[in-house]
Image (tube, coloured by chain):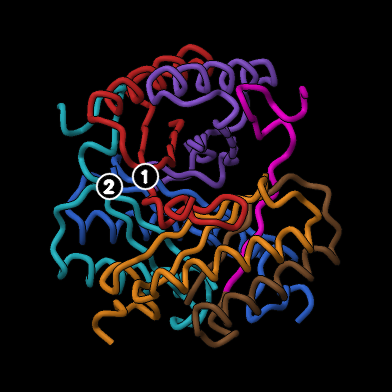
Chain colours: A red, B cyan, C blue, D orange, E brown, F purple
Amino acid sequence: MPTVHLEMLPGRTLDQKRDFVREVTRVTVETLNCPPESVDVLITEYAKDAWAKGGTLISDK
Amino acid sequence: MPTVHLEMLPGRTLDQKRDFVREVTRVTVETLNCPPESVDVLITEYAKDAWAKGGTLISDK
Amino acid sequence: MPTVHLEMLPGRTLDQKRDFVREVTRVTVETLNCPPESVDVLITEYAKDAWAKGGTLISDK
Amino acid sequence: MPTVHLEMLPGRTLDQKRDFVREVTRVTVETLNCPPESVDVLITEYAKDAWAKGGTLISDK
Amino acid sequence: MPTVHLEMLPGRTLDQKRDFVREVTRVTVETLNCPPESVDVLITEYAKDAWAKGGTLISDK
Amino acid sequence: MPTVHLEMLPGRTLDQKRDFVREVTRVTVETLNCPPESVDVLITEYAKDAWAKGGTLISDK
């Protein structure tokens, strides 16, 4: 039942996402003691003009 | 003031979304005792390569 | 796989939550065409000093 | 470390987003006493057929 | 309809939260051009053992 | 800048959370190519009467 949400900037490849969800699921199973099929991973990509740090959009840095 | 967020895979029609928000709002009003106009419903669709179950992206299943 | 998140103020009884998750799951299944066991519902209650409308905390209204 | 998420309908200009993240960061720093570079702001736009009020999609109003 | 979610560590006073929601609502109204009563602000506090940076819980730093 | 949110039922020990955030951060750094100090991990525990599967609260199963 654990659900993992990832928020990140765009730019990663499909292979990186594949690796991320596989590895995050593996360590979730190992550390939280749950069956793999109970783990959901959701990825949200925020465009560079939708994420700011220190008051400035990443697209303006 | 209740807010309902739906996370799902894409592929539903506009009519299905219409029905979903109408029906979810109706049962929210009935079970939580609140005025209909206080209920917000937000829908987020995750692409099949942005949702994984059991460590595998839905797009790879 | 649909997941429904409810955000609301506290004060509802356990029976109201029971009714809410049952009914929301039922209409989700009916309108989105998915098996009941694929539907997760999560409830988050925000204290009245953690929710503001129009710039004023609900606890101050 | 404070993170601010904004959910809104689309239609604002890039300049409005620039102003929003700058001003929200400024008042966050002032009221919560934290360094500006610790503040993240994320913006999610929901299409008019992905947000409902009172059981009706905004796109149908 | 804009909704602002704040995620932060605990430790702020009620007065700081009051100031935060008032000021964030004011700059949201000014920069996004919306009526004050349409702005919701929700605050979630994460305990220091529920937030990690660089792989270490804040409570362990 | 990647942020990972974990939603789970309560019941895990502090050591399990420590291991989770350390390992999730490690695999995030490895698969997404980012510095460790850019990774935030947030944990939200949902009580058993705040999470339902198949229309039934976990606390009623």
The residue drawn where x is 50% and y is 84% is: E33
Quarter-wise, where is residue D44 in the image?
bottom left
The residue drawn where x is 26% and y is 71% is: D49
Question: Residue E42, percent across and down?
Answer: 62, 63
Q: Please say whether residue F21 is one of the residues in the magenta stretch.
A: no
SS for tag 2?
Answer: loop
Q: Which residue is mark 1?
A: A44
Q: Is residue B47 left or right of residue E17?
A: left
Q: Residues within 10 Å of mark 2 (few under 14, many from 20)?
A: some
* Chain identity of mark 1: A
Q: Nearer the viewer, residue C21 or F18?
A: F18
* Chain identity of mark 2: B
Question: Residue F15, percent across and down?
Answer: 67, 15
Q: Work out whether A20 lies above or below E30.
A: above
Q: Please say whether residue E46 is one of the residues in the magenta stretch.
A: yes
* Badge number at residue E26: none
The residue drawn where x is 46% and y is 15% is: A27
Amino acid type, label 1:
Thr
The answer to whether dots 1 and 2 both sit on one chain is no
Q: Nearer the viewer, residue C59 or C21?
A: C59
Q: Contact, CB < 8 Å: mark 1 with mark 2?
A: yes
* Badge number at residue B46: 2
Which region of the structure is painted magenta? E40-61
Amino acid type, label 2:
Tyr
SS for tag 1?
Answer: strand
Question: Residue A9, percent across and down?
Answer: 40, 42
Q: Work out whether E34 lies above or below E44.
A: below
Question: Residue D1, percent across and down?
Answer: 67, 44
Question: Which residue is outermost to the front?
Answer: A61
